[in-house]
Amino acid sequence: MKKLYTLVASLMLTASMSFAQAPQGFNYQAVARDNAGAVLPNTGVNVKITLLDGSASGASLYSEYFAVTTNALGLFTTNIGNGNVLSGNFASINWGTGNGKFIKVELDPNGGTNYTLVGTSQLLSVPYALYAANSPAGVTGATGPTGPGGGATGPTGAAGNPGTAGVAGPTGVVGQNGATGATGATGATGAGTNGATGATGASGANGTTGATGATGATGATGAGTAGATGATGPSGANGATGATGAGLSGGTTNVLPKWASATTLTNSQLFDNGTNVGVKTATPNHAIDLRSNDISVGDGLGTSSVILSWKTGLPTDSVLTFVNQAYAATYFDNGGINSIGHWISLNDNDIEPFDDNVTAMGNPIYRWSSVYAGNGVIQTSDARLKKNVISLGSGLDKVMLLRPVSYDWINPKDGTDRQIGFIAQELETVVPEAVVHSHASEKSLAAAKAAGKPIPAITDPYGVKYAELIPVLTKAIQEQQAQIEALKKEIEILKKK
């Protein structure tokens, strides 16, 4: 059985061949693809054809090139023997000698002369007309002996029959692209309702002022000069005493008074037991004890909102806020640049960062021990957010360089079960896009130390983004499947021999 050689190149052609009735040429049809295996539709390409004698490395009998344009399916058709001649004479090829003829196909997908070898294969069948044109003539019969009176001439031998050309297999059908799924609808944002403002209590009445008593009449002066001094008249009666005005009596122990009006005091809602001060509580348990479900401290957003703010004048003031029971937030206002923190939303039923793509969960040296999720981790992959998108050139060669390992953690704090995965430093030499090497800054380490946090022994850890390996593995599977399909075709050809 003959050996079958198959060339797997970075540029592949799926080809079929049919022979024409014209004596000097035969048809060649192919589908052009790029080095990622994608069809090249409506593209001008240059194809170079070389016919070799006897083997895939035999002498060149004839060479030509074609400038063709593929159709919408990447298909093009040429007639070998009628292209732009580079060397040799197609009409002088002897198809009936040697170990057969081989065809070498080269292609420049950019329409130039920078050809890439596609493959070399044996022409297992030769067009009848081409073979007959160069087949040897029949053998002439021997001349009979001459008789006594002159013998008759022997008959001429019959001409040899030309060989029959083989039929090439048909080209496979190009599969259709799958349909794109529809985009889901965006949920509506719920609106909160402001609570009503409570009514103001009535002011207490003013106390009555007592009346002033009448002044007694002055006695008359006696007449006469140097006369005897008259007797002193009797003193007038004292006027009545007015009523006592309202004083500070009636207060409550440990309750601070307040002015109910310009002249009237009453109890306030502040309590001071000598140790603690309470607001709306007569039994404060802390230095300042506020007991209310409607508290506004700092900025204050009104009676429909509850907000606690620590305003120190620093660029990272803290805010804890509850608004309309629709959300609760804890965040730092970073000088108006962004707000770093988390947001608990009743409308979206989630815990989300206060600002988009700013806040991280943990960091390389302060990690969460485990993260549990019901439906996995979703990573943003929107085409509208990406640019410079290029198909991966290879995958199988990278996968063959990977070293999957099993291992135990040195520190039991990291886990006590046997683990599987990769070594980040090794993976970085093969798929660097999947490896993260972080360095904690001196500033962050100093801040952690000042806050009393423990400092890990390694402050520049390596990490692996395992999701980044999925495209590499997918590309490897595609390349391996292409090899499987090529081997299946070889097996089918071998079965027919």
Image (tube, grey):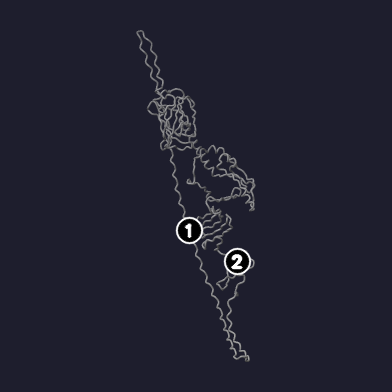
* Residue 323: image tag: none
Secondary-structure class at tag 2? strand
Secondary-structure class at tag 1? loop
Direction left: furthest residue: 149
Q: Across the whole image, how many numbered discs are drawn on residues?
A: 2
Q: Position of residue 278 (x, y in %)?
A: 60, 66
Sequence-wise, which precedes: disc 2 or disc 1? 1
Vertical arrangement, residue 401 with respect to residue 130, above or below: below
Q: Position of residue 65 (x, y in %)?
A: 43, 29
Q: Position of residue 430 (x, y in %)?
A: 56, 39
Direction front: furthest residue: 225
Direction top: furthest residue: 148
Q: Position of residue 100 (x, y in %)?
A: 45, 25
CA gap between label 2 and label 1 equals 35 Å
State the residue in front, 159 or 48. 48
Given contact means CB atoms under 8 Å apart, are the residues at marks 2 and 1 in contact?
A: no
* Residue found 61% across the figure and 66% down from its top: 277
Res 295 quadrant in image = bottom right
Q: Mark 1 is on which residue type?
A: Ala
Res 285 quadrant in image = bottom right
In the rendered image, which residue does mark 2 sit on?
278
Vertical arrangement, residue 183 with respect to residue 269, above or below: above
Vertical arrangement, residue 218 with respect to residue 434, above or below: below
Q: Mark 2 is on which residue type?
A: Gly
Dot 1: within a 10 Å radius of its alpha carbon, few (fewer than 14), some, or many (20 or more) residues?
Answer: few
In the rendered image, which residue does mark 1 sit on?
191
Res 158 quadrant in image = top left
Dot 2: within a 10 Å radius of its alpha carbon, few (fewer than 14), some, or many (20 or more) residues?
Answer: many
